[in-house]
Every structure is written in structure tokens, then in C-alpha cells.
Amino acid sequence: GAGVSQSPSNKVTEKGKDVELRCDPISGHTALYWYRQRLGQGLEFLIYFQGNSAPDKSGLPSDRFSAERTGESVSTLTIQRTQQEDSAVYLCASSPAGYADTQYFGPGTRLTVL
Amino acid sequence: QQQVKQSPQSLIVQKGGISIINCAYENTAFDYFPWYQQFPGKGPALLIAIRPDVSEKKEGRFTISFNKSAKQFSLHIMDSQPGDSATYFCAAGEGTSYGKLTFGQGTILTVHP
């Protein structure tokens, strides 16, 4: 059984460029979450998708951040006009229907903005 | 009001000792309190979780103690092992939106052999 996968594992970009981070949740999991983890810090909630409901975007730090999810499958987190403070590990998690509290995390994408 | 404060930032314990990590919260709407374990280069993994209807939950060497009146909860690792060396995060969630967890800052645990 495959777990949550994320790609790329590492991304180095220049300030001002756009980046796309991908998350493949566990098959059949209806809920998907994105978190940001800055160096030495806890996880910061970004966005939450649950089935066909409108996503909870309350954690997105600015309008440069957006995320999409196709049905109950892959999700893409896009950061436009990246800034150095966007450097962090971006973690994706998924959970099965009715068990939103049991989140399975992927290994993360380490983003470095030069 | 959404913060979860975790202490200590780092902890060094001898093999066989007890590791204790504490968390405090302010939002009384929180009703789900998980602990996550994270190894370097990996995503966090759910370790153990508690809801406020009980004051303690034990799973193997791991125990959560919960004090609702004090709005505090803690993780105890009994007979700590070098393999327990990792970063531990407490978190809190609210009934209608468990998906939106609020995490503590993390504790780096080192267990010396």
C-alpha cells in the first residue's frame, strides 16, 4: 500500500519565480491537507480539501498561494512570485472519510528560494 | 487564541529513562489532541491521540495525560530508547474541523544509549 507521495522532493528556485508542488494522496482518502514547516518550527496549516466541499483556505498566508485538487486525487500547491520567506518544507497529508483526525503525511517538498 | 505552546524545545534522556513533553492551549473549543513523531527527512506520523472525555491514554510505552481545567496535556515516554530519538509535535483540533490541526513548535528528543 503506497503512502502519500510528494514531488519534487527538493526544489530550488529564484526569487520571483512561480513553483508548483504536487501531492498524491493515499487512494480512497477523501480529505487532503497542506502544511508548511519552516526550519525548526511546527507545522503551519495552509489549506484543507474534504470531498466535494469548498476547501478551507484560511491558512494560506497570501494571495500568492493557491491550491487545487482534482476530485479525490492529486493536489497541486502553487506559489507565485516566490519570496525568500517561502523557503520551507511543504507537507501534504490525507485521511479517509470519517477519520479526518487521522492524517497520513507525505515526506514533504523542501523549497529553497534564492 | 489558536496557539499551542510546547515545551521543552529539546530534551536529552538516558536510555531507560522517562521523557516528558508538555503542551498548553488556550482555545477551549479544541477537543482532539494528537501527538506526532517525526524522523529526519520524513513526514510526521501519528503516535497517539486523546479526546477530553478521558484524563489519560496509554499505548505501549507512550502515555498522554490530559488536564482539561488547566488546558494542558503531556506525552510521557517510558523506558525511552535510542530509536525514540526524533522530533515530537503536539497538536490540537476542533470538533467540526479536525482537519485543521494547530501544531506546537516541536521537541527534539535525544535518547543516549
Image (cartoon, rainbow, N blue to C red):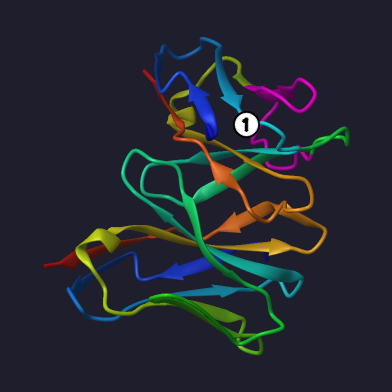
Which corner quadrant of the image does residue A46 belong to?
Answer: top right
Which residue is found at the position 76% from the left and 20% from the top?
A70
Q: Quadrant of the N terminus of chain A?
A: top right
Q: Is residue A104 above or below residue B73?
A: above
The magenta stretch is A56-76
| Closest to the observer, A26 or B69 | A26
Q: Quadrant of the C terminus of chain A?
A: top left
Q: Is residue A85 above or below residue B106?
A: above
Which residue is found at the position 23% from the left and 68% from the top?
B81
Residue A62 colored in magenta in the image: yes
Residue B21 seen in render = no
Q: Which residue is mark 1?
A: A25
| Closest to the observer, A10 or B44 | B44
- Sort mark 1 into few (<14), some (14-19) or many (20+) by Cα contacts within 10 Å: many
Residue A77 colored in magenta in the image: no
Q: Magenta stretch mostly in which secondary structure?
A: loop
| Closest to the observer, B83 or B74 | B83
> Residue A23, percent across and down?
59, 25
Q: Is residue B91 above or below residue B13?
A: above
> Residue A3, percent across and down?
53, 35
Residue A27 seen in render = yes
Residue that protrudes farthest toward the front in the picture:
A1
- The chain letter for the residue carrying disc 1 is A
> Residue B88, percent across and down?
40, 60
Q: Is residue B77 above or below residue A53?
A: below
Which residue is found at the position 77% from the left and 71% from the top?
B29
Q: Amino acid at mark 1?
A: Pro
Q: Secondary structure at mark 1?
A: loop
Side (left or right) of B86 relative to A66: left
Residue that protrudes farthest toward the left in the picture:
B113
> Residue B79, percent across and down?
27, 78
Which residue is found at the position 42% from the left and 75% from the top?
B60
